Amino acid sequence: MRLLVLGGTWLVGHAVVSAAIGAGWEVTTFNRGTSDPFLEAVRQIRGDRTRPEDVAALATAGPWDAVVDTSGYVPRNVLDVARALAPVADRYVFVSTLSVYRDWPSKPLSEQSELLYCPPDAGPDYGTDTEDGPTRYGYQKAGCEAAALAAFGADRTTLLRAGVVLGPREYIGRMPWWLRRVAAGGEVLAPGSPDRAIQPIDVRDLAAFALHTITDDVASALNVCAPVGSAAFGELLADCAHSTRADVSFTWVPDDFLLGQGVRQWSELPLWRTFDGVWNVDTAAAQTAGLRTRPLELTVRDTWRWLVDSEDTGNHERTVEIGISREKEAQVLAAWHRSHEGSI
């Protein structure tokens, strides 16, 4: 199988390339080469997807059985790239996001939920950010989906709407932050309820499923998350404690109290968000199509091993947004304990 991966150096792209090499596929990567080179086992083509001459040169290096696009964010660019590759590739797999749904994160979702509208030729300024609602990122990704469909057609396009992606090389730093905080020990501020269901997907399971959709000719739009009810927030933190062997205790503080203390959802306490739809995504279609997900404890364990063993721990500009300071955490915990002084 001949595969072209657009990207291939960060989280999802790296996992797709690794899985394809492991399956014995012939892999070509296309990126700017600003990150460390991937592996000698791939054919590396350097170029910028925003430069027409680079994309035209890439097209001459085909053909491929499939393209996996992990680096498309602007609809107009995805349209140009996909049109250039359509004559030399049989299938286009676009890695999208649940943010393309109008009601994410406020309501439960399925593939039949309404999408945000964005034209396939939209530029980078299309869409707006709204508090706790649709984002420009979501609008743009919806337009990228439309662009892929316009270039390749519905029978040659697979749209993978990923939820929260965790695992080794996670550059945003959500799981790494929790692991490092738990490893530091002591009393840890835990958000909401330990029973809150969560649905993160291991990046390696997302990558394996992307390849599966190619070999099985799955042409569809699919939500790619762990099944509802497969894990809970308390299990996540317990797995962090087990993996790090930390001397730690968790103090679970209700959502309303955290919000009243000004704790920011999703960023200061990663993966904590109170809206009904965040972790209520129907993945039955993907499961039927062949998606398989590993237990969360394995994702936590392997992410910790990567943090401990690797010199490249995924430092990225977005990591500065992640995590509550130890000072603020202590203040919130103290306020919570004061609020319960004298109670039975």
Image: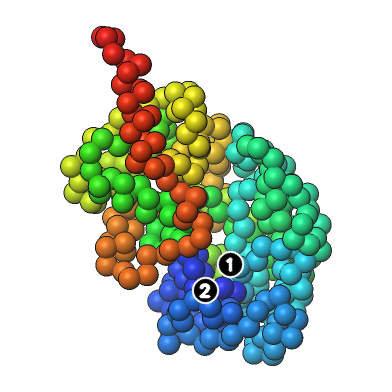
User: Quick check: marks 1 and 2 in contact, CB under 8 Å?
Assistant: yes
Residue nearer the viewer, 108 or 102 = 102
Q: x and y percent of residue 328 in the render?
A: 39, 36
Q: Amino acid at mark 2?
A: Gly
Going 63% across and 37% down the picture, which residue do you hit? 132
Q: Quadrant of residue 269?
A: top left
From where the camera sits, is residue 15 visible? Answer: yes
Kindly identify which numbered label has been placed on residue 151.
Answer: none
Residue 79 as seen in the image, left or right of residue 228: right
Q: Quadrant of residue 339?
A: top left
Q: Quadrant of the C terminus?
A: top left
SS for dot 2: loop
Q: x and y percent of residue 160 in the render?
A: 59, 58
Residue nearer the viewer, 222 or 81 = 81
Mark 1, residue position: 70
Residue 107 as seen in the image, left or right of residue 240: right
Q: Is residue 193 above or below residue 165?
A: above
| Callout 1 crowding tier (Cα within 10 Å): few <14, some 14–19, many ≥20 | many
From where the camera sits, is residue 158 visible? Answer: no
Q: Is residue 273 above or below residue 165?
A: above
Q: x and y percent of residue 114 in the render?
A: 72, 42
| Callout 2 crowding tier (Cα within 10 Å): few <14, some 14–19, many ≥20 | many
SS for dot 1: loop
Mark 2, residue position: 8
